[in-house]
Structures are given as structure tokens and as C-alpha cells.
Image (cartoon, rainbow, N blue to C red):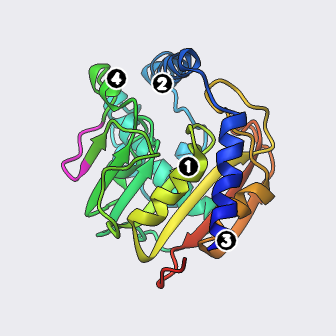
């Protein structure tokens, strides 16, 4: 109990010291929307994939032909290819060999952006926790997916029942949130006992308006200490990443301990 209180106090102090003024929050939200509309989506509309590894991932999985049957794919097809490649990318980064890992499960994604991972991962039910969901809808950025629901809420207060999700995915989003401690607590709450958290986040980068938190491997381990660690990995900077990338696969303990 004391350990839990100390951990909570530590992250509350950190949040107080790094809190974002209201005007900065509006600026942050605007900057993130500009990224998706004027950079990410604009690049796809020019006929280019956002990540250059999309063709490689799809070809290695034997899925390229099903998308690119008639020469150069159109915008809608490229969106689907980008989304499917995101599924394969997450599996590769977390070193999960089972390509059916998400199939038939209830999957929650924290801060998915407009990529469309949930629509292409095969989940029985996908829940996207995305504060910009309404703006994405207005700009036509959401992929059709009858099993995916977008909730325009922050990850600090997820409107889902306890023990709801089989898997929670957070890729390049934990350093974007207002209060990482509350987000991780919410993730633990909504996961079923034995459920998995897949965390992928940049570490040791300088704080920015859209990524206000600077994590280290040690701070992340402390933040996630209530989870059982399955594996933790770290990748160096690449042409696709501006910082070192931390990857963790965690399991919610089956017995709840104070």
C-alpha cells in the first residue's frame, strides 16, 4: 500500500512540475491536428506512404498482392495498406510471432491517430481512445470499420468498465498525454486479469508541444511496475524515428494487490 502511495505521489509531483497551461493545451491539440491533416494525410494523397517500410512489411507477410492488384494503389487502398502495415509493425516491434494475436479479441488503442490499426488488426471489438476523433471525422480521416468505435475522450479517464479489454496498445502516445500515471492506472483497470499491454514509446527525446514528457527506461519501468513484464526491448534511432524507441510487453497480474 505504501509503495502504491509513493508511486502515486511521485507521478503527481512530476505532473505538477510539467503541467501544461490551458492555452498550451489548445496549441498542442491544434499542432497535432495539423500534423495529421497537413503532413500525414497530405503525403498519402500525394501517393506516398508515411512509413517507407509499408511495402516491405506487406510483402514479407504475403499481403502486398491483395492490395496492389492493378498497379499503383489509389488513396483509399493506400490508407488500408498503411493501416495493415501498422499491425505488422507493432507485431514486429513487440516480437510477437503470432499474426493472429489480435484476432477475435477486444482491443483498446490509446491515441491511435488516423492510421487505422484497429480496423485492420482483426479484433472482435476495437475501441479507440482518441481526443481528436471528432476532428478526424470532420476531415474524413477515419477508416470505415463496423467493429471499431472511436471515443473522443482523454486516456486519463476512459469510459469503459473494469476488466473490459483483452489487449491495450499504446504506440507513440504515452508521451503525448497529460498525466502518464493516470493513463497507466486506467489501462490496468480496464484490462482483464492476464490481459496484455503493448507499449511503444520514444525515450530520451527533448520535450515538445505535442510530446511534453521525456521518458527514460528507468522511469517507464517505475511507471509500469504493477504489471508483470513479459519482455522489454530498446531500438536505436532509425530513418523512421527521431529518438530511441522503448518497447514493452506487459501482463496485468491475475490477482489484485494493494
- Find disc 4 in the rendering and name its residue: 135
Give residue 90's position: percent from left, percent from top: 54, 56
Q: Secondary structure at mark 1?
A: strand
- Mark earlier in primary sequence (1, 4): 4
* Tag 2 residue: 36
Residue 191 in the image: x percent, y percent? 41, 68
Circle 2: is it few (<14), some (14-19), or many (20+) Cα within 10 Å?
some
Q: Where does label 3 land, which residue?
A: 2
Q: Earlier in the sequence, mark 2 or mark 4?
A: 2
Q: Which residues are magenta?
A: 143-148
Between 62 and 71, the residue placed more toward the observer is 62
Judged left or right of residue 42, residue 240 is right
Q: Earlier in the sequence, mark 3 or mark 4?
A: 3
* Disc nearer the start of the sequence (3/2): 3
Q: Nearer the viewer, residue 93 or 197?
A: 197
Residue at 25%, 46% in the rendered image: 149
Majority secondary structure of magenta residues: loop
- Residue 96 vertical position relative to residue 11 in the rendered view, above or below: below
**Hey, which quadrant is residue 237 in on the image?**
top right
How far is disc 2 from disc 4 in space, using C-alphas?
Answer: 10 Å
Across and down, in percent, residue 21 comes to 59, 21
Amino acid at each position: 500500500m505504501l509503495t502504491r502511495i509513493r508511486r502515486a505521489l511521485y507521478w503527481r509531483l512530476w505532473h505538477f512540475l510539467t503541467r501544461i497551461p490551458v492555452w498550451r493545451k489548445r496549441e498542442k491539440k491544434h499542432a497535432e491536428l495539423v500534423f495529421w491533416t497537413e503532413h500525414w494525410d497530405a503525403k498519402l494523397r500525394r501517393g506516398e506512404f508515411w512509413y517507407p517500410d509499408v511495402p516491405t512489411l506487406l510483402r514479407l507477410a504475403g499481403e502486398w498482392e491483395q492490395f496492389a492488384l492493378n498497379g499503383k494503389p489509389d488513396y483509399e487502398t493506400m490508407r488500408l495498406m498503411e493501416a495493415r502495415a501498422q499491425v505488422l509493425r507493432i507485431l514486429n516491434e513487440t516480437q510477437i510471432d503470432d499474426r493472429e494475436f489480435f484476432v477475435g479479441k477486444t482491443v483498446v488503442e490509446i491515441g491511435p491517430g488516423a492510421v487505422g490499426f484497429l480496423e485492420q488488426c482483426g479484433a472482435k471489438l476495437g475501441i479507440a481512445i482518441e481526443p481528436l476523433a471528432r476532428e478526424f471525422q470532420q476531415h474524413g480521416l477515419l477508416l470505415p470499420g463496423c467493429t471499431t468505435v472511436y471515443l473522443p475522450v482523454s486516456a486519463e479517464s476512459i469510459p469503459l468498465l473494469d476488466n473490459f479489454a483483452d489487449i491495450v496498445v499504446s504506440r507513440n502516445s504515452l508521451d503525448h498525454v497529460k498525466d502518464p500515471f493516470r493513463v497507466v492506472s486506467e489501462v490496468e483497470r480496464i484490462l482483464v486479469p492476464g490481459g496484455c499491454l503493448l507499449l511503444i514509446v520514444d525515450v530520451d527525446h527533448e520535450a515538445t508541444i505535442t510530446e511534453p514528457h521525456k521518458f527514460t527506461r528507468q522511469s517507464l519501468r517505475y511507471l509500469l511496475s504493477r504489471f508483470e513484464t513479459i519482455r522489454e526491448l530498446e531500438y536505436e534511432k532509425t530513418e523512421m524515428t527521431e529518438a530511441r524507441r522503448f518497447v514493452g510487453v506487459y501482463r496485468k497480474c491475475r490477482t489484485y494487490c494493494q
